[in-house]
Amino acid sequence: MELSPQDIARCIDISTVQAQHGEAEIRELVQYAREYGFIAVHALPCWTKFLSELLSDRDDILVGGPVGFPSGGHRTETKVFEAKQLIADGLQEMDLMMNIGMLRSGRYAYVEEEIRAIVETAGTMPVKVILEVYHLTDDEIKQACELCINAGAAFVKTGTGWTPSGATLDVVSLITSFVGDAIKVKASGGVRGLEMFTTMYNLGVARFGINVNASIEILRECAALPG
């Protein structure tokens, strides 16, 4: 399938989730989303209400934000409380940081129950579970995907983008071949260039987390193609 720049933009979440990001960065990102048609803008929880207000006239651009970010080590009750507050503030898509330490300790029931608690709190809102694959073995990645499927999450997401590597072709291929159609996949961290984007899309990735400059470059590459 040939993708247009518009098709690509509707697969990309752009974000301002670094600690130093504030009002100016959020306003700038919203402007990019308006100009290029990116599907979602993500900000840290304290900015969700502000972001929702900025996008109140655009129901085609979703308000996204994280829960338990970036470590995932919060208690389940804390994550549930945060999720409820984000929903009250106007959130439309939720990226949940999985508890990596619990997964790597073999406490699978804890991880699954926590994801399920957030999914139930979110209701019809899509929940994307961040695996942070950089810290996981292939078997742990598969185990995490299985727990996400069992708990009813909408997506598994490769990572926060804060690690040295994230969405490599090998990892994306591993995840998409394992999950099939059971859950959607979001690739985040290190996706660069139209060729890499298209390859991952063809592997089955439904959503991408890419920094705004790299996203715009991908759109320009696509627009410059002949025909």
Image (spheres, rainbow, N blue to C red):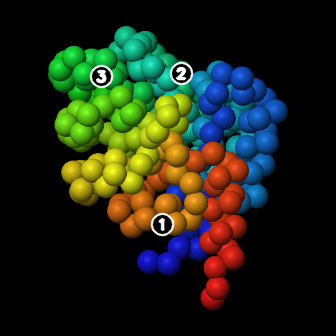
Mark 1 or mark 3, which is nearer the start of the sequence?
A: 3
Read off the residue under disc 2.
Answer: 85
Q: Amino acid at mark 1?
A: Thr
Tag nearer the camera, 3 or 1:
1
Is residue 198 visible to us here? yes
Q: Residue at x 62, y 68 (%)?
A: 6
Tag nearer the camera, 1 or 2:
1
User: Which mark identifies residue 75?
Assistant: none
Circles 3 and 1: CB atoms closer than 8 Å: no
Residue 139 vertical placement versus 213 (above, below)? above
Q: Amino acid at mark 3?
A: Glu
Q: Quadrant of the C terminus?
A: bottom right
Q: Amino acid at mark 2?
A: Gln
Q: Residue at x 66, y 22 (%)?
A: 19
Mark 2 or mark 1, which is nearer the start of the sequence?
A: 2
Residue 187 vertical placement versus 163 (above, below)? below
Give the CA separation, mark 3 to mark 1. 33 Å
